[in-house]
Amino acid sequence: MTNSELCPCGRTQVTPGKSAKAVALPYAGCCGRYLDHWGDAAAPDAESLMRSRYTAFVLERADYLQATWHPSTRPAALDFEPGTKWLGLAVRRHRPTGEDRAEVEFVARYRVGGRAVRLHETSRFVREGGRWFYVDGDIHP
């Protein structure tokens, strides 16, 4: 992915001025700063980490997903479903649940094997040593 391409997570920023409008952020100014500089740049909050993890799934970056998964729940390995086409992400809610804990509710859409899939989850995150980690989540029907 080039730095000028729009970030897969779909995050927008409102342009200032009289004709303010939401514009999608480029990869470099959004999730790219975390995925491409892991160790140097950490997501500032649970929502940013969740968005960067979605982007890592789109880009099949198992290294980043493993590094941002809390060791207590991290799987030994990750496999990606061949032919998966990620279609979009909608963050419904981001809320702190403690000083170093938060939840993010989201819907991720993708297509695999010609079948559309909608993943609706409330994910739990924890901050340790100044970094946010994905812990686990509840999938909604």
Image (cartoon, helix red, strand yellow):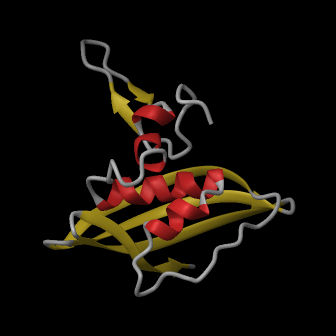
Question: From this viewpoint, which residue is outermost toward the left?
Answer: 99
- Residue 115 against residue 24 in the figure, above or below: below
Q: Quadrant of residue 57?
A: bottom right
Residue shown at the point (37%, 23%) measured from the top left? 21
Residue shown at the point (41%, 73%) measured from the top left? 123
Q: Percent position (x, y) of residue 77?
A: 63, 78
Q: Percent position (x, y) of residue 64?
A: 51, 60
Q: Percent position (x, y) of residue 106?
A: 46, 62
- Residue 23 against residue 123 in the figure, above or below: above
- Residue 79 against residue 76 in the figure, above or below: above
Question: From this viewpoint, which residue is outermost toward the bottom?
Answer: 72
Residue shown at the point (32%, 61%) measured from the top left? 46
**Quadrant position of the C terminus in the picture:** bottom right
Q: How many marks?
A: 0
Q: Quadrant of residue 56?
A: bottom right
Q: Foreground: 134 or 131?
A: 131
- Residue 84 against residue 37 in the figure, above or below: below
Question: From this viewpoint, which residue is outermost toward the front?
Answer: 39
Question: From this viewpoint, which residue is outermost toward the right?
Answer: 113
**Quadrant position of the N terminus in the picture:** top right
Please give left or right for residue 41 compared with residue 56 in the image: left
Q: Percent position (x, y) of residue 44?
A: 26, 53
Residue shown at the point (50%, 42%) measured from the top left? 10
Please give left or right for residue 49 compared with residue 108 in the image: left
Q: Foreground: 91 or 18?
A: 91
